[in-house]
Image: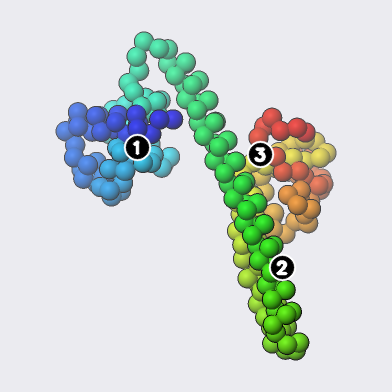
Amino acid sequence: MDYNKIGNLIMAERKAKKLTQAKLAEQLFVSEKTISKWENGNGLPDTNLLPKLCEILDISLNELLCGERNTGESDSDNKQQLLLNMAKELEDKNKLIWKCMWIIMAVSVISLLGGLYLISVFVTEGVWQLVMILVLGVVFLVPCFFALKLEVSVGAYRCKKCGSEIVPTYTQALNAMHMGTTRYLKCPHCNKRTWCKKVLYKDDEK
């Protein structure tokens, strides 16, 4: 999606309705700064705001996300292209989240090993050394919990028995045994527990 085109359309339709940024912001229960951000192409409205924004500006959701009023091109073609664009953006976002998760885990493990080495070298054996190791372990868990949240937020886990895709809650994923990003989960479709491999996209190999 072209954020600048969408922003320009919002601005043009707002002005056509003789609405100021402040007035539009008031109707949407957002700040004037948020409207300015949209119109400058620096962001998109939250999904829950889209229907109301379209109603106020008297445009369709398809027109808003395409950034232009419908022309001679068929509406079905517009929608198809829009779906392709949204799918591509979602794929890029998932890739970024997945990369961030692995970076967090790598940095955490390196920091843990480095911390353990420094403690063993500079801290005398005894209670204080044990306390520092325990503190280091707790600190190590914090980014691990965050990395798991990122892992759960993208893609799904594929059941080895029936091939169905499972999207567990954070708690379910946290409590499940795991090997890397493969987790032992109960499939709601076949009702069996099995090792479920993480997949990001529908076309990932089964």
Residue at label 1?
41
Circles 3 and 2 in contact, beta carbons < 8 Å = no
65 with respect to 31 (left or right): right
Marks 3, 1: nearer the viewer? 1
Q: Is residue 204 above or below residue 34?
A: above
* Residue occupied by mark 2: 113
Say which residue appears at 70% left-offset and 40% top-offset. 199
What residue is at 63 percent from the left and 71 percent from the top?
A: 139
Nearer the N terminus, badge 3 or badge 1? Answer: 1
Q: Secondary structure at mark 3?
A: loop
Task: From the top left corner, tell me how far across and down residue 125 is, in percent.
Answer: 76, 87
The residue depicted at 38 percent of the width and 34 percent of the height is 3
Q: Quadrant of residue 197?
A: top right
**How crowded is the residue under tag 2: few (<14 C-alpha within 10 Å), some, or many (20+)?**
few
Q: Position of residue 113 (x, y in %)?
A: 72, 68
98 horizontally vs 11: left or right? right
Mark 3–mark 2 distance (CA, rounded to whole Å): 30 Å
Vertical placement of residue 16 versus 173, above or below:
above
The residues bearing labels 2 and 1 have C-alpha atoms spaced at a distance of 44 Å
At label 1, the amino acid type is Gly
Q: Quadrant of the N terminus?
A: top left
